[in-house]
Image (spheres, rainbow, N blue to C red):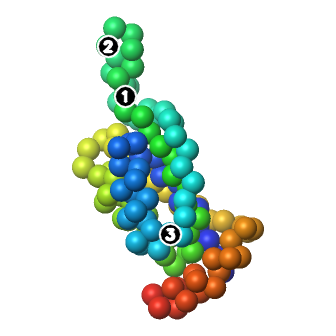
Amino acid sequence: MRFKLIIAFVNDDVTDAVLDASRVAGATGATVINNARGEGIQKTKTFFGLTLETQRDVILLLVEEHMSRDVLEIISDVGHFDDSPGTGIAFQIDVEDAVGVSHQIKELCETVEDRI
């Protein structure tokens, strides 16, 4: 079984919605890293030297490769990434190997067979 790692940087107010939607799309779990900070093309605004930016979370999802595009698209939709700049970004990378997921393999095999 082959996996993709989806890495999503989302505003912290949509993290729970993104997690719920990604589970519906086929993700079996996630790791959330809180309080990340980022900067895009536009420099962040300041107010008397204090940076005005929303907190971001980093979501890591190890997803079976046949389901990865669906999960990636639902993250973008729920996170409103294309609505305005600076709302988030997500991408996927190939995973060479993974351990600790053997308990999910049986369920994933059945799910993937149903989707293909």
Q: CA distance from mark 1 to mark 3?
A: 29 Å
Q: Quadrant of residue 65?
A: bottom right
Q: Residue at x 36, y 56 (%)?
A: 17
Q: Amino acid at mark 2?
A: Phe
Label 2 with label 3: CB-CB less than 8 Å: no
Residue count near mark 2 (Cα–Cα under 10 Å), binned few <14, some 14–19, many ≥20: few
Residue count near mark 1 (Cα–Cα under 10 Å), binned few <14, some 14–19, many ≥20: some
Q: Residue at x 38, y 65 (%)?
A: 21
| Residue toward you, 31 or 112 | 31
User: Residue 27 has which mark?
Assistant: 3
* Label 3 secondary element: loop
In the rendered image, the quadrant that contains the N terminus is: bottom right
Residue that extends furthest to the top in the rendered view of this protein? 48
67 left or right of 45? right
- Report which residue position mark 1 lands on: 53
x and y percent of residue 32 in the render? 54, 49
> Is 66 located above or below residue 48 in the figure?
below
x and y percent of residue 40 in the render? 41, 35
79 left or right of 102? left
Q: Quadrant of residue 44?
A: top left
Label 1 with label 3: CB-CB less than 8 Å: no
| Residue 69 visible, this angle | no
User: Residue 47 has which mark?
Assistant: 2
| Residue 45 visible, this angle | yes
Q: Amino acid at mark 1?
A: Glu
| Residue toward you, 109 or 43 | 109
Q: Earlier in the sequence, mark 2 or mark 3?
A: 3
Foreground tag (1 vs 3): 3
Q: CA distance from mark 2 to mark 1?
A: 11 Å
Q: Earlier in the sequence, mark 1 or mark 3?
A: 3
Q: Amino acid at mark 3?
A: Ala
